[in-house]
Image: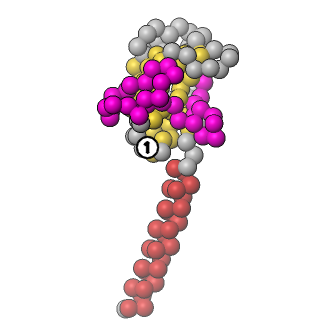
Amino acid sequence: MKNTLSRITLGLGILTITGAALAGGMSGKLAVKGSDQDVSGGTVTTDMVMAESNGWLVVHRTDKAMKPGPVVAYAPLKKGENHNVAAILTESVMSGDMLMLMLHGEEGGMKTGIFEYTLGAKEDGPIRVDGKLVMDVITAK
């Protein structure tokens, strides 16, 4: 019986290590994925966002120069994988407009859970990996 229990414990230990390794590998890949979409309902929705901590999905206007412009929507994110995150538009977006869906942090502001970023500010600012913004660009339909 003791020998059987040891094998079960060892087997669970290997399973736990493998599961942790897989989860750890996924958490290191911050990402924002979106698709071109109809925004006439007043929202922009991501396919997926991977965040290393609680933060924000921020929707910026952009154009062919691919520089983030004014914020037109934002929504809170939880640490880990987030699917179908919907952000309510705060101004009108027309069919054909390009939108940058960007990962922002929840650091540097005065209040937790309140989006405090303004273009160029450090509060609740953009997350970068190797100097590059974590974002995706879509076109409104």
Q: What stretch is highlighted in magenta?
A: 108-137
Q: Can you identify the residue that label 1 sits on?
A: 53
Q: Disc 1 marks which amino acid?
A: Ser
x and y percentages locating residue 60 in the rendered image: 52, 19
Q: Is residue 73 above or below residue 17?
A: above
Q: Residue at x 63, y 34 (%)?
A: 132
Q: Is residue 36 visible from the viewing direction of this image?
A: no
Q: Is residue 22 above or below residue 31?
A: below
Q: Residue at x 52, y 56 (%)?
A: 24
Taking the view exactly as shown, the residue that stands out farthest to the right is: 65
x and y percentages locating residue 75 in the rendered image: 40, 27
Which quadrant would residue 36 be assigned to in this image?
Answer: top right
| In this rendering, position of residue 8 left or right of residue 131 | left
Q: Is residue 1 above or below residue 108?
A: below
Q: Does the magenta stretch include residue 55?
A: no
Q: Which residue is drawn at 43% across and 43% down?
A: 53
Which quarter of the image is occupied by the N terminus? bottom left
Which quarter of the image is occupied by the C terminus? top right
x and y percentages locating residue 29 in the rendered image: 57, 46
Q: Is residue 11 visible from the viewing direction of this image?
A: yes
Q: Does the magenta stretch include residue 127?
A: yes
Q: How many labels does the image show?
A: 1
